[in-house]
Amino acid sequence: MCGICGYIGPETITEEQLWKMNNTMHHRGPDDGGVWQCSVRGREVGLAQRRLSILDLSALGHQPMLSEDGRYVVVYNGEIYNFMEIRASLERAGYHFRSNCDTEVILYAYAEWGDDMFDRLNGMFAIALYDREQDRLILARDRIGKKPLYYYADQGHFVFASELKPIMQYPYFHKRVDKGVLNHYMCNKYLAAPMCIFEHTYKMLPGMVLEYCGGEIRKRRYWNILKQYHKGVSGRHPDYGTCKRSMKELLQDAVAARLVADVPVGTFLSGGIDSTLVTAIARECKESPVNTYSIGFYDEKRNEAPFSAAIAKYLGTNHHEHYVEEKDIFAMIRDLPYYYDEPFSDSSQLPTMLVSQYASQDITVSLSGDGGDELFCGYKLYDMTWVAQHADFMGAIASRVPGIGMMKKTMPLELRAFIDNRGQDTKAQLFIDVMVDEVDRILGRHADNIKYEHEKYLRMPNWQERKMLLDMQTYLPDDILAKTDRASMKYSLEVRCPLLDHRVVEESFRIPHQYKYRRFDKKYILKEITYDYVPRELLDRPKKGFGVPLQKWLRTVLKDEIARYADEDILRKQDIFVPHAVQELIAKQLRSDKIIYSSILWSFYVFQKWYQMYIEDLW
């Protein structure tokens, strides 16, 4: 696990400047760092990396790493779980290795197979590989989007990095906010790839290879989730028993692969289905007890620590439990703009940072249960999607009632969402219309394409399946995985996700939907696999979630700071938000318990803190 960055441009930058870019990611790789620069055909090239040592802790794993003949140079962030298998194939082909790390395997796999190498990799990765002979830079991101990769392209300069901080330190970067993406951020709490907060700056899509050669950018997808879905549907398993047995075997293999490391490994154990299953399989794979970590809250409405402890006791893990107070969570807010270096307002980032901080005291690698909800239909919103589909005819009738426009102003937001959900290509994107109306008011402009266009390519009749696939392309990589990456890397902790092994993802598409969702019984087959390890009574309960008391904070401890960020003169000078509309939003949030108001106001607050750190301190 590391941080990478680099550039190709018409002007050189000093080694000191490249180190400055690189060292903004010291938290991602505190164990080692390196830079490499050269001039090729009138272009200046530089690569850099910060290293968190996981495999082969020796200096032989140092990056940037050059091939023996000096033609290829690579920097890489992530883990390749099948690198020993690939290495064996390369050794049979005549390659010789100096280290025991996966970086060297990537280097020679590319020399042997070129771009076809990426199809062979099983892991999470962001790779930058430069071919000196062809003056060709290759960037690649893993299939699911576990590891981040940004790039900036403008006026002959091409810069890439694991985070935005190195790009902002590049001497020829023009730091201008892209106001066209702000509606998306305010509605969704994050920006989905390829969008980014800065102009001419983008996120790589999952499963993408990008080539930069001769000043031209070429992109292709070596793995596409929609194609894999259709492939899975065409080969679905004939019965439930086959589905369960096949998935269980794959999960066992995926967990075992992620336990391999030269440093201490543990698991996050929230007490839910996903983390329990991962922990149970890990316990089965290891001779010694697994280290497990959970945090508890003194607020009983949100506290799941007793359930985690009961499961840990049953499994016989070496359990670590840390209770946190509200002030501990609140103290994390000041770090948000630095470690999430574009606006990101999923507030569950705060407890995720806390559990990462706690676990990192003992271990360097942790397994998590991320991905289970998207693959196996686990979110509450999927219940709402089911209801929306079965009640859609009523929404259609209501939308044609005379005077419905005036009536909607006073009706519950949930009812408005059903009535407004008329677009045939966006049926699975429930509730967005309500968010759009509020966001348009405070930004003073309307964005026509807030709803993701991805859904128009999702023609399956079941809206739940559409929503799940849409989440896999947007919410999963750009919210859930981005959140976990930044929260864990803040504390130099690597998080691995067995449920997001691409083979598990592909296998999930071979499972008929009725084995995942049975009339409000979500994640059915995943639960049944988990019950093979842990008694049903330890898990059969409503999920409490991993949230923070946003509404309370916005009305109390954050109230004065928000008022300062919403000052009319400041907002006019900033020229992003409509002052009177922001004041109205603050008033609505004070009067109403509707989550929509606290959600948008929190996004406003997080944006303003980010703006203050990176753009201009107006306050």
Image (cartoon, grey):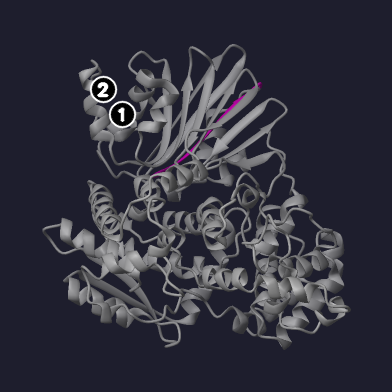
**Do the residues bearing badges 1 and 2 touch, measured as CB atoms within 8 Å?**
yes
Q: From this view, report whether residue 183 is shown above or below residue 108.
A: below
Residue 100 appearing in the image: no
Where residue 284 appears, as percent x and y from the top left, is 16, 60
Instruction: Give the CA separation, mark 1 to mark 2.
Output: 8 Å
Closer to the chain start, of discs 1 and 2, is 2
Residue 9 within the segment the image draws in magenta? yes
Local packing at callout 2 (Cα closer than 10 Å; few below 14, some 14-19, many 20+) is some
Q: Which amino acid does label 1 sit on?
A: Val
Q: Is the magenta stretch mostly helix, strand or loop?
A: strand
Where residue 529 sits, quadrant-wise, is bottom left
Where residue 283 sits, quadrant-wise, is bottom left
Magenta-tinted stretch:
1-10
Identify the residue shown where x is 69% and y is 46%.
Answer: 198
Where residue 86 appears, as percent x and y from the top left, is 27, 30
Per the image, label 2 sits on a secondary structure element best described as helix
- Quadrant placement of the N terminus: top left
Along the viewing direction, whichever of 326 and 394 lies nearer the viewer: 394
Frontmost of labels 1 and 2 is 2
Residue 106 appearing in the image: yes
Side of 538 where 474 appears, left or right: right
Along the viewing direction, whichever of 504 and 488 lies nearer the viewer: 504
Identify the residue shown where x is 66% and y is 32%.
Answer: 153
Residue 21 within the segment the image draws in magenta? no
Identify the residue shown where x is 46% and y is 60%.
Answer: 374
- The residue where tag 2 is placed is 90
- The residue where tag 1 is placed is 105
Per the image, label 1 sits on a secondary structure element best described as helix
Identify the residue shown where x is 54% and y is 16%.
Answer: 135
Along the viewing direction, whichever of 93 and 463 lies nearer the viewer: 463
Marking on residue 206: none
